[in-house]
Image: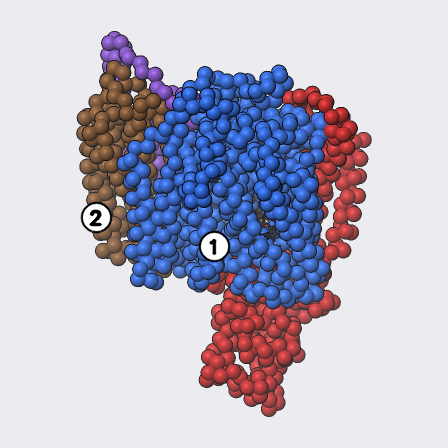
Chain colours: A blue, B red, C brown, D purple
Amino acid sequence: MSSIAQKKGFGATLWDYLTTVDHKKIAVMYLIAGGLFFVIGGIEAMLIRIQLAKPDNDFVSAGLFNEIITMHGTTMIFLAAMPILFGFMNAVMPLQIGARDVAFPFLNSLGFWLFLFGGIFLNLSWFMGGAPDAGWTSYASLSLASPGHGIDFYAIGLQIAGAGTYIGGINFLVTIINMRAPGMTYMRMPLMTWTTFVASALILFAFPPLTIGLFFLILDRMFGGNFFDHTMGGNTIIWEHLFWIFGHPEVYILILPAFGIFSEIFAIFARKRLFGYSSMVFATVLIGFLGFMVWAHHMFTVGLGPTANAIFAVATMAIAVPTGMKIFNWLLTIWGGSIKVTVPMLYALAFIPSFVAGGVTGVMQGAAPLDYQLHDSYFIVAHFHYVIVGGVVLAILAALHLYWPLMFNQMLSEKLGKWTFWFFFIGFHMTFFIQHFLGLMGMPRRVFTFGADQGWDLFNLISSVGAFFMAAGVIILVVNIIITAVKNVPVGNDPWEDGRTLEWAIPQPVPFYNFKQTPLVRGLDTFWIEKQEGNKEGMTYAEPLSDIHMPNNSFIPFMMTVGLFIAGFGALYNGEKEWAVPVLVLGLAITVASMAVRSVKDDHGFHIHKEDLMNEKGGK
Amino acid sequence: MMKGLKKWRLFSLLAALTIFLSGCGEEYLSTLTPAGQVGRDQFNLLLLSTAIMTLVVIVVVIIYVLALVKFRRKKVGENVIPKQVEGSHTLEVIWTVIPILLLIVLAIPTVIYTYKHADVSAMDHVDADGNKTAVTVNVTAKLYWWEFEYPDLGVVTAQELVVPTGEKVYFNLKAADVKHSFWIPAAGGKLDTNVENVNQFYLEFDKESAGLKDGVFYGKCAELCGPSHALMDFKVKTLNRTDFNAWVESAKTTEAVAEGDLATQGEEIFNTSCIACHATSAAGSAGGVGPNLAAFGDRNRVAGFMEHTEENLKNWINDPQSYKPGNLMPQPEQLNNGEKFSDEQLDALAEYLMGLSIEK
Amino acid sequence: MDLNKKYTPQTWPDHPEQVTMEGKNKFLGFWLFLGGETVLFASLFATYLALKNKGPSGMEFSTQTLFELPLVFIMTMILLTSSLTSVYAMYHMKNHNFKGMQLWLGITVVLGLAFLALEIYEFNHYVHLGFNYSQSAFSSAFFTLVGTHGIHVVVGLVWIILLIVRNAKRGFSLYNAPKYYTASLYWHFIDVVWVFIFTVVYLMGVVG
Amino acid sequence: MSHDAQVYVKSETEFNYIKQKRRKDMRGQITTFAIMIFFTLIAFTAVAADFSKYLIAPVILLLAVVQVILQLFYFMHMSEKNHNVPMYFLFVGAFFGFITILTFLTIIWWG
Ligand code: HEA
Ligand code: HEA
Ligand SMILES: [Cu+2]
């Protein structure tokens, strides 16, 4: 089937992608869309750094600057980092556990489209009267006071995209719980799968509070609610709590998959089993759990009282312990191994000191009285870019190189990869290290400009120069991708030669049904075991060759999303334009009708027959 | 022996850090040059935590570099399959327990200071005559400016906070429109000004600000509050107790008087156009629509952030929106029959305003 | 496998909803969804409790003056009973008694509609008193919490009606058994939420 | 992993046994229902009878919790095997929800 797809015309390919329910194609779409948003968010970051390169700059205006930082933060977190990670999870996790597809292929596609259209909706604000300007945290008093529709775009856009993420989370959870191949016990699951599991559980519990918070914001701004209007008895702190009850787990939703990716990389390129596997699993779960107990560390200066601050301060510090376990386990994994410094490994190696530096500043912020000084200063900006860029973005770049051959059957250039790495890595430290000091020297964050002679001029300039290095790195990466795609040299499976888990055992290009026969998993790092035992095929099978049941493609997810997208505009202009309510109703009607079609029309999927499987040698 | 060594290491690290860090930043603005007990506590916590964190980073980096040097494939050989180690319980215990100990060291002062800095019980103490013993300031944060009311003294000012040195000064913090946050980096941490409740804390100031570069400490708004959030600065003047008492007395009694023709002319314009929002007497209570201008001539900045020159003042009056986007001061056209102020009018206004002073 | 295969009571599996992989996934996925819903409603309850009786100065409405227990009592009884009737429906599903299941689900729907009608009446009544959505933070929180539950009732009803109608002529299959089963889970969950609503909102509201 | 369901024909005895067992279960469900109704009555009566607020609140909350546990374990079959994962996730969700409610009741001030 995939070989047939190659010969199809553009229209047919497009239709194929619009309707696909194949986790591998959805992964590619996540990667492309997320990558685009990353570049958009990156350009916004560049604008920020250009504006702040010198004091009293007027490159962008005050109002525009606030729009830029808001969109930068929102885009990067919701539309770049998370979806790209979702892409890798989609591409890798089902293969790692020996599944033919995810548990809900239809919902998988729905989740993607919701994310994409939510993101588009949010970004349309640029062209429709101004972007949101109250920060990615959108604190209620300011977000209620903000004129225009910017905040409305934020609330509705995130609501749509968030629904997609939520659906994706449930899908991954069920996939991991129900679809593991025989022998793949929980304690044999690769770490990437484990972190996907825990991150998805966090999504399951963290997104509902955000949904509710956004819902309140929408109701207050567009439908006459009074949740945050204190003159009507409302309370803005409710928003802050709901946002951070979501927001703190969110940062672990980002970092845990990154941990998973690095765990794979260290094991592969040190040619060594992950040290302390079971404590790694334990730490992952513990981090996830503790992640829900600490949100108020973002609110130390709100005035919650010393008891609340003390409790949340101590709880926050506790997270350092499981995270430390992970760091030391990684160190001990490469200790005594045989380290090969490929591009993915380079990123993994760079990650350790960078992330530790970011993590320990987090613990410093966790010390509440110290945070009274650090909060809302550039120290915070430094902290979270150290953990996010030094953790999540490095993981994304690493995974891009690591899994590129798995996803596209071709290798990114190692040489250009190293160039990207060095530019990005040096630029990253240059940009953000110095920001710690800016914060300590009294520079608040979210300032569109700063007066000269407050002692901040030089450091800001250095920081801005660093950002250009990062941009250069990203541009080289784009070049690398284009060159590789044009050359298109197939590499086959296990291109890194030391692959340890099932995904590297599958023939390339991966057949759309993944496994012709369900594999039997005989231990942790099952592919490694097979290779060590001299099994050329790399897999032992759990069942004889038989018919495979596959789900049908469907256009309904796309239609459901379009309906919500249209309804979003109706809600946005409610009470302002006459057509608002009809449009709202129309949009919802499209969505509901699509759902009705889905539930009325039976969809039993189709079978690939045994004979066909045997004909197509090697499962192509 | 190990313990002694560690202590010694920690100590020298601390000393080195102090020197290094206080080299950064400006004395009137940096958290690294604390100007009062609260800031100093927090700075000490910074030093302690930085020391612990540096230690952690160093340990990690040492293991890391050793591993990298010793176990490169080039070195161990291309075809070597390393031993597949499962893990080690001893090591697990070590790297669980040591971080916990380090965190306890950090957590104890954290909790102590948390309670200490929130203790405002002395705020309502009164002396034998029933007068409050401590100075309390009601701070109201408004869109891009700050109002400071001294409820027990009957004085109100704006943009420049005046406080006595050597004693705890208590603050009641509130926002009038959207949320802001009150921060004097050199004196200590920030506290939010919320819209629905009053937050309380205290700060201390050791030193009179007269010796600083501008003669004031810098204060900042630390919570995004709209387009001109970055410009929502204020200044802090610290006086010894005698000077402070004199300042209070003068603030209560000084009447705004225009000296000279030009200033009198300015006063007239002011009284038709500006008086509805701006008070010119510091005696009274909070609630001004615009900042109280009684002490305008003594100020350090125009509109909180521009250099204190007549030129800037005139520019500001004639186009406040372009200097502080989103602020609530009407454009001159709204006050002056649809026109900008003429140069003469501006000269007069500036003359009048620059003459308003309570310190002379 | 033919999902439309016909079964007899003797061949019908013990857990028809969990025989196929699709059924298993649906079953688990739906439970996880309910886990998320728990947090969702907890957030709504938390907000309601924080904003209970809060309004513009001099607000005349409060939980004590507003709520009337007899109506709530009737609504509670109706919804509790509908929970039992859907248990009956599942009982018949297990016994491969299609007619029985459809009938009991029909009764569930009727009860659900009755509940909904009373709720609409109640809301309408409050609005007439002047306690409308925009009246105060309290009113917003109240209508949003109880209304979100109401919307769940609507969704549940539409879902069950669709199932009844769509499968009326087709009888049981392993394809629709998981659908019936999850719909009934949903309906129970609605009841679970209501138990907290009548306790926390109404009863504790009247107590003050 | 298989998508196929083995068709298994029950013997007459087995079939009857299972049917009997189901009937018994159903009777249990009705008992559960009776308890739930009873609890509801107690709760409403307690409020109508105007007992002290500090007595009523904990009692009716407790009744609600027990009722919900009955719903979950019997009506929603959580007591049956194969429900470990659902139970785990539901309780974790309930726990996080509880913490949320607790903080909203304590550290959001009243003003
Ligand atoms: C991927 C994202 C990510 C990650 C992983 C983290 C991880 C952590 N974060 Fe961070 N954080 C953010 C993203 C992230 N954060 C963002 C985006 C914000 C700002 C939001 C905004 O306001 O816009 C923020 C803000 C933020 C604050 C609020 C600051 C403020 O606004 O006042 C605090 C306060 O406690 C904090 C703490 C922590 C802690 C303790 C960790 C810990 O998990 C770190 C643990 C790791 C280590 C400690 C290193 C490894 C450990 C060892 C080697 C063992 C030994 C260590 C010790 C004994 C210390 N973070
Ligand atoms: C995943 C999260 C993420 C990531 C990856 C980044 C990445 C970067 N961020 Fe930031 N950032 C946030 C999340 C993130 N950020 C958040 C949440 C905030 C808070 C917002 C708020 O206050 O509300 C913030 C705020 C923030 C600020 C503070 C703004 C303020 O408070 O006033 C700054 C300032 O320096 C900054 C800079 C950067 C820089 C230089 C990068 C760089 O790493 C970016 C690197 C990427 C590029 C440079 C892309 C380059 C691409 C091109 C140049 C185009 C090439 C195109 C083609 C070839 C087609 N970010
Ligand atoms: Cu956090």
Mark yes or no: residue B16 visible: yes
Distance in Å between CA atoms under marks 2 and 1: 42 Å
Q: Is mark 1 within 8 Å of ligand 2?
A: no
Q: Ligand 3, what quadrant?
A: top right
Residue drawn at point x = 61 percent, y = 22 percent: A528
As rendered, which of C126 and A161 lies closer to the eye?
A161
**Can residue A347 be seen at all in this image of the molecule?**
no
In the displayed structure image, the side of residue A171 where residue A597 appears, left or right: left
Residue D58 falls in image quadrant? top left
The secondary element bearing badge 1 is classed as: helix
Above or below residue A565? Residue A195 is above
Q: Quadrant of the N terminus of chain A?
A: top left
- Pointer 2: residues within 10 angstroms few (<14), some, or many (20+)? few
- What is the chain identity of the residue bearing mark 2? C
Quarter of image, res B299: bottom right
Q: Which residue is mark 2?
A: C121
Mark whose residue sits in front, 2 or 1: 1
Q: Residue at x 20, y 31 (%)?
A: C168
At label 2, the amino acid type is Tyr
Contact (CB < 8 A) between labels 2 and 1?
no
For this orientation, the residue located farthest to the bottom is B261
Residue toward you, B263 or A153: A153
Find residue D93 and report its horizontal and vertical position in percent: 43, 35
**Which amino acid does the dot numbered 1 rest on?**
Asn
The x, y position of residue A387, in whole percent, is 61, 43
The numbered mark at residue A123 is 1
At x 35%, y 36%, the residue is D61
Q: Residues within 10 Å of mark 1 (few under 14, many from 20)?
A: many
Tell me: residue B170, above or below residue B297: above
What kind of element bears circle 2? helix
Chain label for disc 1:
A
